[in-house]
Image (cartoon, rainbow, N blue to C red):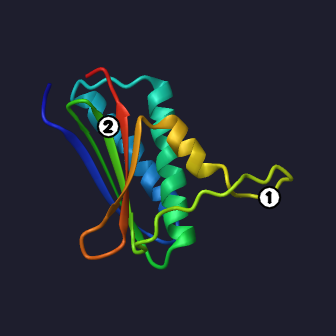
Amino acid sequence: MGDPVRRHCECGIEGAAARAREETRRFFEDARAAAHAAPCSLQDSVLLVVSELVTNAVHHTRGPCSFDIVWSRGGIDVDVTDSSPEPPTPRPPVPEGTAGGYGWPLVHRLADEVDVRPAPGGGKSIHVHFATAS
């Protein structure tokens, strides 16, 4: 296996999820160029989780967030860091058409590992791991 493939994004607030999705797409292009193959289903899962975590970071905390993604031995690791030290609070989904309550369970279902960690300098980082064959 070659060197790890990495991407970092200071997402800000306005358009944060779109920027993170674009960095994720570029990450997979870089990975292909480095001979790391990812099935479309894995790419879709990573894109959805990244979008959900960055959207929540901007929506539920004060200030901007950052996003890191790396492909190294054993899988793809995603970290979304924001300014709040509070962990996500799961809430029941409301099926009557209102938004909310679906994202955190979806992140847990799509990822192989989910962990909330304190971030250096305050805030938190949500770390998500997706196992890969290479």
- Relative placement, left or right, of 117 versus 45 is left
Q: Is residue 75 above or below residue 48?
A: above
Q: Nearer the viewer, residue 111 or 6?
A: 111
Q: Nearer the viewer, residue 91 or 97?
A: 91
- Relative placement, left or right, of 96 versus 28 is right
Classify residue 124 by image quadrant.
bottom left
In the rendering, which numbered label is found on residue 86?
Answer: none
Q: Amino acid at mark 1?
A: Thr
- Location of residue 73 in the rendering, given as x and y in whole percent from the top left corner: 20, 31
Q: Which residue is denoted by mark 1 in the rendering?
A: 98
Q: Secondary structure at mark 2?
A: strand
The C terminus lies in quadrant:
top left
> How many neighbours does mark 2 have within 10 angstroms: few (below 14), some (14-19), or many (20 or more)?
many
- Location of residue 41 in the rendering, given as x and y in whole percent from the top left corner: 50, 26
Classify residue 19 by image quadrant.
bottom left
Q: Which residue is denoted by mark 2 in the rendering?
A: 76
> How many neighbours does mark 1 have within 10 angstroms: few (below 14), some (14-19), or many (20 or more)?
few
